[in-house]
Amino acid sequence: MATTVPTLDVPRFSLAERERRWGKVRELMDREGIDVIIAPSNTGGRDGLQANVRYLTGIGVNSSPVAAIFPRHGEVTALTGPVPYPEYWLGFQDWVTDIRAKFFSEGDAIIERLRELSVDRGRIGIAGLADVPRMPDGIVPYGLYMKIRQAFPHAELVNATYLMDEARFVKGEEEIAFLARAVELVEGTIETMIQEARPGVPENVVYARMLAYMVENGAELPTMILWAAGSPQPPTNAFMPTKRTLQAGDIITSEVEAHWGGYVGQVTLTGAIGRVPPEYAEMYQIQQDIIDRAYERFRPGVLIDELLRIGEEATQGTPYQSRMIMHSRGLGNDAPIAVFGTRDERIRNWRIEENAVFVIKPVVMTDAWVRSVSWGGSVIGDSRPATGAESGASTVCWGDSVVATPSGARRLGKRPRNFIEIG
């Protein structure tokens, strides 16, 4: 007698969304002559490096090691770890039924499935082989690559990263709805921060309350809350707070993400324990002007390079500098990404398309901040080593997740675009 698999109470996409995605990916595979795509497991980047797997299968949460084998013709296969068992994933989604548990033997399981697909002399695409956003050297283990190479000496192995970037770039309506829910969770998390942050409260306690809000409201883990607080302002955010107690006059900066069904909403904020200092108020007004200009230009057809110049245009004649940070939003490690510049010409010449989703978060900063911080020199146009924190090293940033439309950016968030004053 067949076992009935209970449907789990988790966010899920429709079969129509599956067909939209699979059709797009297979269309690109036809164009590139790729017979099968392998998306190996890699739970780094707070599950962002699992993005291709989850995009194709709907499977994965909280660093579950899952791989996908996606043929141009035939059944899609998901390879999971022994925990949870395959029936769990059958209740988690209804896109893929060929789910195989591997016990620390992903390479062998991939080769077994490839042999079933008879791709001995085919063209095998490996997603993540190179040119991954934030990881340009790739995320595929050398041992796995060599195991596939040796098992299929007559097959052609190619990088499928760009193909998957292209497939994932324009979002479907269901994806946008998931991202909107993720941003809603972020905004609730920010409200929790505003309620909990007071002089004398340890930073890690505020952080814990923020995480608790997310989990209680259905968000997935792991997630990212970049955080910094202090007076003078710390030069950059960190990935975890300390047990330091908040003080009156502290400047707080944070990038808050929440995951809903794998989709990652983000909001970036600047705030203060108390009143906003006059210099910060002036910088914030300039930053919001840059946001307005960027939102106006964020339309189908505009190049990333055009958007990157907006901050420098807006700060001419002021005592401040500005650089743009913007990157695609989706399942985590999404292309393209531009942080104070771009890695290569491909990103500079990337055109925005309708229903692409980005977080746009220009940074306005003092010259002292530029001297205090080094992200590799050329990224902010100054190859000198950082001098360390100095007086007047200040920066502000605000950003929301937005959708590209013919009339400009449409915000997914609803909170006021204000410099947050707490207490």
Image: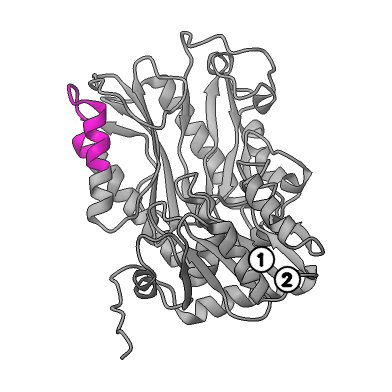
**Residue 322 vertical placement versus 392 (above, below):** below
Query: Residue 19 at what x, y percent from top left?
Result: 56, 80
324 vs 257, nearest the viewer = 257
Quadrant containing the C terminus is: top left
- Is residue 339 at least partly visible in the picture? yes
| Residue at 63 percent of width and 64 percent of height | 111
Q: Where is residue 115 in the image (x, y as percent from the top left)?
A: 67, 72
Q: Earlier in the sequence, mark 1 or mark 2?
A: 2
Q: Which amino acid does label 1 sit on?
A: Ile
Q: Viewed as shown, does residue 320 lie left or right of 160?
A: left
Q: From the viewer's perspective, is the residue at label 1 or at label 2 nearer? A: 1
Report the amino acid beneath label 2: Met
> Relative to 357, is 137 on the left or the right?
right
**Residue drawn at point x = 45 percent, y = 58 percent:** 103
The reply, left or right, for residue 423 in relation to residue 93 is left
In the rendered structure, are the residues bearing label 1 and label 2 in contact, judged by CB atoms less than 8 Å apart? yes
- The reply, left or right, for residue 328 in relation to residue 166 is left
Q: Residue 133 in magenta?
A: no
The image shows residue 98 at horizontal and vertical percentages of 49, 76
Residue 113, located in which quarter of the rendered image?
Answer: bottom right
**Residue range corresponding to the magenta coloring:** 194-210
- The tag on residue 29 is 2
Q: Residues within 10 Å of mark 2 (few under 14, many from 20)?
A: many
- Location of mark 1 (residue): 37
